[in-house]
Amino acid sequence: MIASLIPTYVYTEMTPNPNSMKFVADRLVILEDQVAEFVSADQVKGNSELAARLFTFPFVKNVFIMANFVTVTKDADSDWDLIKHEVREFIQRHLMEHRLAVVEGFQGLHLSEENVADTPLAQHKVGSELEQKIADLLDEYVRPAVEKDGGAIQLDSFSNGVVKVVLRGSCSGCPSSAVTLKSGIENLLKSMLPEVQEVVALEA
C-alpha cells in the first residue's frame, strides 16, 4: 500500500511527429544527466516499470524519457484523440506513486547493449577537438529545440566532412526530421565550421 502520493501534474504537448506525443510533468522524472529510450518491452529489462507498463498498451511502439517528460510513440493506426487522455492519466498516476520514471539506481542506457562501457544515450561521442566543437554547437543551438519537441540529438561521429547524429524520441522516424536535419542543423554547422560538409542521421 502506498503511504503517500507525490503531487504531480502531467499535461500533453503535440510534437512534429504525428505519431509521438510529449507527456510533460511539473517536476523531473529522471535525473538531469540521464536519458532512457525503449523501442520494445523486451528492451526495458527492469529499468523502468513505467515503460514496461506502457508497452502493455498495444499501440505503444517507443517510450523516451528525459528531464521532465515522457514521449510516447504510437502505431500509425491509432488516433491520439481517442487514447491520449488514458495515457496521460496512466503516466500521471504512476509518477504520483514513484519519484522517478526509471528504477532507483538507474545508470542510464548505453548505445550498445553488448558494450556497457559505451557512451550513454544522454552524451555525445566525442574523440577529437573538432567533435567537441560540434557537440557544443549541438548543445547550444539544437538541443533546446529538439527537447522541446520531445526528442534528443546525439553526436555519433565526424569523419571526412560528414557529421553523423542519432535522433531519439519523437525525432526518430519523424517525417519532418529530414528537413530539419538538412535545412537547420546542417546549415548551422556548415556556417560555423568550414570542415563540415554534410550532416546525416543514423538509426537509433
Image (tube, rainbow, N blue to C red):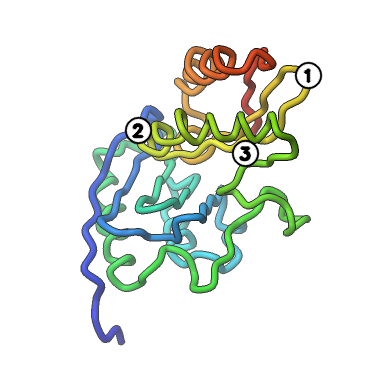
Disc 2, disc 1: CB below 8 Å?
no
Lateral position of residue 200 relative to residue 64, left or right: right
The residue under label 2 is 15
187 and 165: which one is in front?
187
Residue 122 at x, y percent in the picture: 55, 48
Residue 204, numbered label: 3
Label 1 sits on a secondary structure element that is loop
In the picture, residue 161 is in which quadrant? top right
What distance separates the C-alpha of mark 3 from that of mark 1? 22 Å
Label 3 sits on a secondary structure element that is loop
Residue 185 at x, y percent in the picture: 52, 21
What distance separates the C-alpha of mark 2 from that of mark 1? 33 Å
The residue under label 1 is 160
Question: Which badge, 2 or 1, comes first in the chain's sequence?
Answer: 2
Label 2 sits on a secondary structure element that is loop
Observer-side mark, 2 or 1, equals 1
Disc 3, disc 2: CB below 8 Å?
no
Question: Which badge, 3 or 1, comes first in the chain's sequence?
Answer: 1
Residue 131, numbered label: none
Asked if 57 appears above or below 96 in the picture, the reply is above
In the picture, residue 27 is in which quadrant? bottom left
What is the three-letter code of the residue carrying label 3? Ala
Asked if 6 appears above or below 175 in the picture, the reply is below
- Total labels: the figure holds 3
124 and 202: which one is in front?
124
